Image (tube, rainbow, N blue to C red):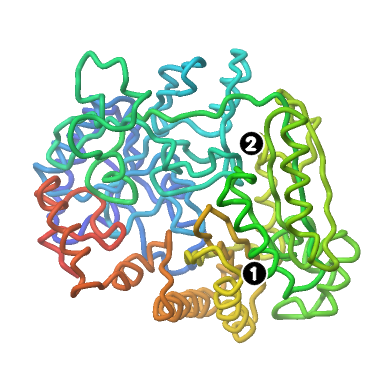
């Protein structure tokens, strides 16, 4: 056996070695990754190069629920913490790295079966290893008239993204809301099916979201109460046609009245997709390099931003709206949108229409996410600074959908980023009643001080916006305890509830300790 490094704290090396032998018997030697070199694809890719805080001792890659149940049983027997990832592509939030250093990563890439596609009822039953690109290709290959809603990068797990409250941009863009029925292995090793799946001969596991009694699907999202091994997901029927509508605002301050103009249209479903309103930098850093505009250090100055906007044809902000259905229906929706924003001076509207089955090569790259077409183009933004090891971290507070709330959040973000001297992209992702500010903050991961100051500043923003009444929807490993602590009503009653559930469902505390700030009884931090 290879010499194992970074074994879990408090675990005797001989005992850990016995556990590794047992794990190897379950998944086979080829599916036990033991060396740091083999772990490279499972670290936080943007952590400081010289001081990795979140490192695994081992990576296991099971191929079935049965193997996974045996892994959980071994972990319980030896007291080994497990950290489960589907693809482990959660970059900007910690990648596939574990919260507790020394944990054994259980990576589910080999559990990659698409078990059922039902075109009539518009759903798929699949395993966690299936990526957005793979699901899209499967639907196209077999001629299903169903769409995959995709996030910005298509390499991630369909299930993993939904469980982490990830989003896409069609009317099915709230991925967690499309989950209908889960199969879950609890921390005690029990195998459970939620909703109608609790009935062994159910004909409704993926067609009806609630069973008899409480609905448990949400319990296993952004939590560490179980490992999801299968999920039903509702898919969007392919529309007759669809249209990408871009609303370009000329000036920085124009975004706030634009948000107010869009709000009633999103609420009454004139706009039915997951509309995003993004700043110029969110677009420009994916389309160019910093040296195209500026050779100095620090954030891009105003004059360079102006030159970039003119050369690339970008406004200070742009709203990306999707319309779907018959041309007549979309015309009516478009006219309602144009009327709602007619009072906004300097706003320009660009619209492009496509057939419902338009292939990727016929769709403008900027429009593809609205059509459920997977892409990796946004990965280009990591080349913006030309760093040898670029990094980014996410800052993602939720607010009511209003211009006033948007301005409060952007004032905080702009002030901190100006003081930090970092470039960032920002976008508001709209729901009928709320919006997420998605900020991507860039840094140089080869420079420990750059990493430290960027993370410290991001933590400061989490605290500041929490004091103003805004909470994060998602967070990096480093911020999970901090974000959880902001939900402090009644002396942290929500945290106590989560810990009670944790102890009941995972009595030995082996599943992802510390995820979302939820710790087992033996490790109250």
Q: Quadrant of the N terminus?
A: top left
Circle 2 Cα neighbour tier, 10 Å, few/some/many (<14 / 14–19 / ≥20): many
Q: How many circles with numbers are drawn on the protein?
A: 2
The x, y position of residue 505, in whole percent, is 14, 45
Q: Which mark is residue 302?
A: none
Residue in front for this viewpoint, 179 or 422 = 179
Q: Which mark is residue 424?
A: 1
The x, y position of residue 521, in whole percent, is 11, 60
Residue in front for this viewpoint, 119 or 462 = 119
- Of marks 2 and 1, which one's residue comes earlier in the chain? 2
Residue ID at (50%, 57%) = 433
* Residue lying farthest to the bottom in this orientation: 419
Q: Is residue 49 visible?
A: no
Residue ID at (49%, 22%) = 122
**SS under mark 2:** loop
* Residue lying farthest to the right in this orientation: 311
The x, y position of residue 265, in whole percent, is 63, 52
Which residue carries the number 2 mark? Answer: 374
Q: Does 297 appear above or below 337? A: below
Give the CA distance from mark 2 to mark 1: 24 Å
Q: Is residue 116 visible?
A: yes
Q: Does 331 appear above or below 224? A: above
**SS under mark 1:** strand
Circle 1 Cα neighbour tier, 10 Å, few/some/many (<14 / 14–19 / ≥20): many
**Direction from residue 64 to residue 476 in the image, left or right:** right
The x, y position of residue 438, in whole percent, is 56, 62
Residue in front for this viewpoint, 361 or 254 = 254
Q: Quadrant location of residue 414?
A: bottom right
């Amino acid at each position: 056996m290879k010499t194992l490094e970074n074994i879990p704290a408090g675990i005797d090396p001989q005992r850990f070695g016995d556990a590794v032998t047992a794990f190897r018997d379950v998944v086979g030697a080829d599916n036990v990754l033991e060396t740091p070199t083999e772990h490279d694809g499972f670290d936080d890719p943007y952590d400081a190069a010289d001081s990795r805080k979140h490192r695994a001792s081992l990576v296991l890659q099971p191929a079935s629920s049965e193997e996974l149940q045996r892994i959980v049983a071994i972990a319980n027997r030896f007291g080994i913490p497990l950290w489960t990832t589907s693809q482990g592509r959660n970059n900007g939030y910690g990648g596939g790295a574990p919260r507790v250093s020394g944990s054994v990563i259980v990576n589910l890439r080999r559990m990659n079966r698409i078990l059922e596609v039902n075109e009539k009822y518009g759903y798929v039953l699949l395993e966690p290893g299936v990526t957005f690109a793979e699901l899209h290709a499967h639907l196209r290959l077999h001629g299903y008239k169903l769409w995959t809603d995709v996030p910005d990068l298509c390499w991630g797990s369909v299930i993993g993204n939904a469980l982490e409250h990830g989003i896409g941009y069609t009317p099915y863009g709230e991925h967690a809301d499309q989950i209908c029925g889960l199969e879950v292995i609890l921390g005690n090793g029990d195998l459970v099916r939620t909703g109608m799946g609790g009935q062994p001969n159910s004909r409704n596991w993926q067609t009806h979201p609630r069973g008899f009694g409480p609905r448990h699907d949400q319990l296993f999202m952004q939590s560490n109460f179980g490992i999801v091994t299968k999920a039903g997901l509702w898919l969007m029927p392919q529309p007759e046609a669809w249209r990408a509508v871009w609303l370009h605002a000329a000036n920085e301050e124009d975004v706030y009245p634009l948000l107010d103009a869009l709000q009633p249209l999103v609420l009454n479903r004139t706009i039915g997709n997951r509309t995003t309103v993004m700043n110029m930098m969110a677009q420009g850093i994916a389309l160019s390099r910093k040296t195209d505009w500026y050779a100095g250090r620090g954030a891009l100055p105003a004059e360079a931003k102006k030159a970039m906007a003119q050369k690339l044809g970008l406004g200070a902000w742009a709203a990306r709206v999707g319309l779907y259905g018959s041309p007549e229906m979309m015309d009516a929706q478009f006219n309602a949108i144009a009327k709602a924003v007619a009072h906004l001076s300097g706003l320009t509207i660009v619209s492009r229409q496509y057939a419902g089955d338009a292939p990727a090569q016929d769709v403008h790259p900027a429009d593809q996410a609205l059509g459920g077409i997977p892409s990796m183009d946004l990965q280009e933004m990591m080349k913006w600074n030309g760093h040898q090891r670029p990094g980014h971290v996410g800052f993602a507070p939720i607010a009511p959908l209003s211009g006033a709330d948007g301005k409060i959040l952007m004032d905080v973000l702009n002030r901190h980023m100006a003081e930090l001297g970092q470039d960032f992209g920002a976008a508001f992702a709209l729901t009928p009643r709320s919006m997420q500010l998605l900020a991507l903050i860039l840094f140089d991961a080869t420079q420990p001080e750059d990493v430290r100051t960027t993370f410290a500043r991001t933590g400061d923003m989490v605290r500041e916006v929490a004091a103003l009444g805004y909470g994060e929807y998602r967070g990096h490993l480093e911020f999970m305890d901090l974000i959880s602590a902001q939900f402090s009503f009644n002396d942290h009653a929500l945290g106590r509830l989560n810990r009670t559930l944790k102890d009941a469902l995972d009595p030995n505390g082996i599943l992802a300790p510390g995820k979302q700030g939820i710790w087992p009884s033996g490790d109250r931090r």
